[in-house]
Image (spheres, rainbow, N blue to C red):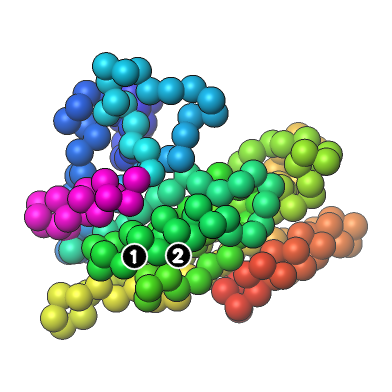
Amino acid sequence: MNAFDANGITESGMARTPKEIEPRVLEANGIKFTHLSYTFGFNGLSLPASQPWRSAEINPTRIIADAKKARSLGAQLVIVSMHWGTETVAAVSSYQRKAAEAITASGQVDLIIGHHAHVLQKIEKVNGVWTVFGLGNLLSFHPTRAAFPPSSQDGMIVTVKLGLDAGGKAVVDQPVVYPTWVDKSNGIVIRPVLADLADPNVSAAKKAQLQVSLDRTASVLGDFIAK
């Protein structure tokens, strides 16, 4: 967190003090919003018993309460990030779905962004709320083997236009996906798939690899890929 602060990056879901775990309201283009973050666990570790505020764990009741608090502080839009899902499994788990359904049914959350599975997962509306279940791998440099299949090299950058209607109600457009691919052939290069496929300077061999990645991505997120 100190490093984030030093570089002007806002963080959410972790804290150095009890106060820092509380929702914070930010502002962009005249709209006040909050970004709440939660995780299902800590890779076998536990929070210190005396410091449960160190990180926010997934609990729909808590998330809804945090969203309500953020709105009471002036937030007009509430975005929630969820560290969830089963590693290397593209299918949305029952745990993910139940949590998403409980949170979105509250009417307090406007967008959910998920990650952790290390492979892409679907995007859909849950109770009318756009839910990006899994971003895949944007940076992770996993070895390609049985534990981490080629699909673990696929990721995406998602853009979502958010705003308010005349009555002050949240308006969230359909997410747009820009596929990425972790190229491990020469160190590590994060390739923007669509741009590189259109680039005449990218080799035919590299484009063949990019096309395979794009085909995998399209099988999960075809309707959302940027045109």
Cα separation, mark 1 vs mark 2, equals 9 Å
In this picture, is 146 found above or below 34?
above
Image spot of residue 6 (x, y percent): 32, 27
Quarter of the image containing the C terminus? bottom right
Task: Tell me which residue sits at (60%, 78%) in the image.
Answer: 223
**Nearer the observer, 224 or 53:** 53
Where is mark 1, residue-wise? Answer: 104
Image spot of residue 153 (x, y percent): 72, 48
Quarter of the image containing the N terminus? top left
Question: The residue under label 2 is which amino acid type?
Answer: Thr
**Is residue 139 among what the camera can see?**
yes
Where is mark 2, residue-wise? Answer: 131
Q: Are marks 1 and 2 in contact (CB under 8 Å)?
A: yes
Question: The residue under label 1 is which amino acid type?
Answer: Thr
The span shown in magenta is: 59-75
Q: Residues within 10 Å of mark 2 (few under 14, many from 20)?
A: many
Q: Secondary structure at mark 2?
A: strand
